[in-house]
């Protein structure tokens, strides 16, 4: 082959290869563009991990009573927390006002975020709210602008056909409410004022609104802050929490209208499973028939799920038998005391923080097993999302609220794939 022909041959091969690369790249780009068009929020498996679907070979199906309350909780399917948002506070800066919404999470809540959650398949949003930085007088009157903003965001959930929970969150302090004798009178004044305003403000919402009395009521700063120890101080605290849960029910029901029958959620001491499993805990008396939901928080197993000082970052569906057993133990206790007897339970905070760049499969495994374990026992769960993705703290974020894109779609998909196990519609 002479030189001109050889050059022409090489050029033709180069052009053919270039054309193939161009077509392949163009196809990939077109496919990516189609994916974005079909799901602009990118709830698409990353391809980096396997998303387990738990079945009867992994978990038995529990007998669930056939009543309206359990059907209501079942319809909630899977929940998500709008954490580090309306629960944010700064007691050293009383002038922040509405800016507190973005103070911790650095993201203003949008209607599109709620659309992304509903599109994914979530049917419940918990909206934790701290009120004490938004009081305009000594009578504990809530700033109308703050209340209106909370209601606006709650309405977005309803507009999407979702349910929402509103509560009293980080107000548990000696300045506002605190479950001991010294602060009992002040606490009741504070809680009564806040609950009455919440009940009046949300009275126009139908059953898509669930009101929750308190978040993790406890003896803040004491040695027994995070667990009952049988001490007189702990027993006294439980007694006040029982009284306040009853007061909450009485106040909400007393406002009438939709509040006369809406579902209300109440926790025990520090919202732990042991707090409601304690013989000292009492379910409030309620004129509405079976409209009380037991609310629980359980970052279990703790070393893996929540403890930032622990290096435990593994959760294997075959090997992690002790961790699976720890989940089963507390859920069995909740099932036997409440669900089995027709009383609904929501685990409205759970999750597993990111500890290492390569722990995604463990977190996905955990989410799938935990959510299926709750579902088979008739309980609905809400992932705690604080919109934290960096640093060395509690990195629970799974959706980027600024860009409204799923940061960890595999975790969301693990939740959604397993949230109706034994409760299929």
Image (tube, rainbow, N blue to C red):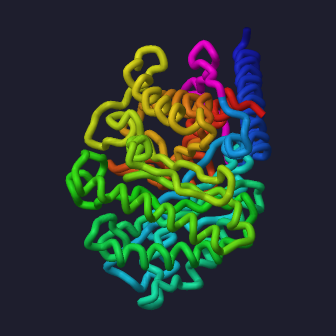
Give the dominant element type of the magenta stretch: helix, strand or loop: loop
Q: Residue at x 28, y 61 (%)?
A: 220
In the displayed structure image, the side of residue 57 where residue 302 appears, left or right: left
The foreground one among 361 and 155 is: 155
Q: Is residue 99 above or below residue 67?
A: below
Which quadrant is the N terminus positioned in? Answer: top right
Q: Please state the horizontal and vertical placement of residue 364, each as a whole percent of the image.
A: 52, 31
Which quadrant is the C terminus positioned in? Answer: top right
Q: Residue at x 61, y 43 (%)?
A: 344
Which residue is farthest bottom? 137
The foreground one among 171 and 18 is: 171
The foreground one among 346 and 88 is: 346
Q: Residue at x 62, y 50 (%)?
A: 405
The foreground one among 281 and 299 is: 281
Q: Please state the horizontal and vertical placement of residue 75, each as a whole percent of the image.
A: 72, 43
**Residue 402 visible to the viewer:** no
In the displayed structure image, the side of residue 202 where residue 275 appears, left or right: left
Which residue is farthest top? 1
Q: Residue at x 22, y 57 (%)?
A: 222
Q: Please state the horizontal and vertical placement of residue 40, each as a whole percent of the image.
A: 72, 49
**Residue 343 visible to the viewer:** yes
Does the magenta run of residues contain 364?
Answer: no
Q: Which residues are magenta?
A: 41-63
Q: Please state the horizontal and vertical placement of residue 412, each as a whole percent of the image.
A: 60, 39
Image label count:
0
């Amino acid at each position: 082959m002479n030189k001109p022909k050889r050059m022409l041959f090489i050029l033709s091969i180069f052009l053919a290869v270039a054309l193939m690369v161009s077509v392949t790249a163009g196809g990939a780009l077109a496919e990516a563009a189609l994916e974005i068009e079909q799901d602009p929020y990118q709830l698409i498996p990353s391809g980096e991990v396997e998303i387990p679907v738990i079945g009867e070979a992994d978990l038995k199906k529990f007998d669930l009573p056939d009543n309206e309350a359990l059907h209501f909780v079942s319809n909630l399917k899977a929940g998500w927390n709008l954490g580090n948002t309306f629960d944010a506070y700064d007691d050293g800066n009383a002038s922040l006002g509405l800016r507190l919404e973005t103070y911790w999470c650095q993201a203003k809540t949008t209607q599109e975020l709620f659309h992304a959650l509903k599109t994914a398949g979530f049917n419940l949003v918990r909206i934790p709210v701290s009120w004490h930085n938004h009081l305009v007088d000594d009578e504990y009157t809530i700033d109308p602008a703050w209340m209106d903003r909370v209601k606006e965001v709650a309405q977005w959930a309803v507009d999407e056909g979702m349910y929402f929970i509103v509560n009293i969150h980080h107000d548990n302090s000696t300045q506002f409410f605190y479950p001991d004798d010294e602060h009992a009178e002040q606490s009741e004044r504070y809680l009564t004022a806040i609950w009455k305003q919440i009940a009046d403000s949300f009275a126009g919402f139908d059953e898509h609104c669930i009101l929750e009395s308190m978040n993790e009521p406890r003896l803040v700063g004491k040695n027994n802050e995070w667990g009952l120890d049988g001490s007189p101080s702990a027993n006294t605290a439980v007694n006040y929490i029982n009284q306040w849960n009853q007061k909450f029910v009485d106040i909400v029901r007393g406002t009438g209208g939709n509040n006369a029958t809406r579902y209300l959620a109440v926790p025990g001491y520090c919202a732990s499973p042991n707090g409601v499993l304690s013989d000292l805990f009492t379910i409030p008396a309620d004129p509405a028939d079976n409209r009380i939901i037991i609310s629980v928080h359980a970052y279990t197993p703790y070393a893996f799920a929540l403890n930032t000082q622990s290096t435990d970052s593994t959760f294997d569906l075959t090997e992690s038998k002790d961790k699976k057993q720890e989940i089963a133990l507390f859920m069995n206790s909740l099932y036997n005391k409440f669900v089995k007897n027709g009383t609904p339970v929501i685990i409205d905070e759970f999750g597993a923080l990111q500890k290492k760049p390569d722990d995604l499969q463990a977190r996905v495994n955990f989410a799938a097993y935990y959510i299926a374990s709750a579902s088979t026992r008739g309980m609905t769960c809400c992932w705690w999302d604080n919109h934290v993705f960096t640093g060395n703290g509690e990195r629970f974020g799974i959706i980027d609220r600024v860009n409204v894109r799923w940061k960890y779609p595999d975790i969301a998909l693990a939740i959604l794939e397993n949230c109706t196990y034994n409760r299929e519609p």
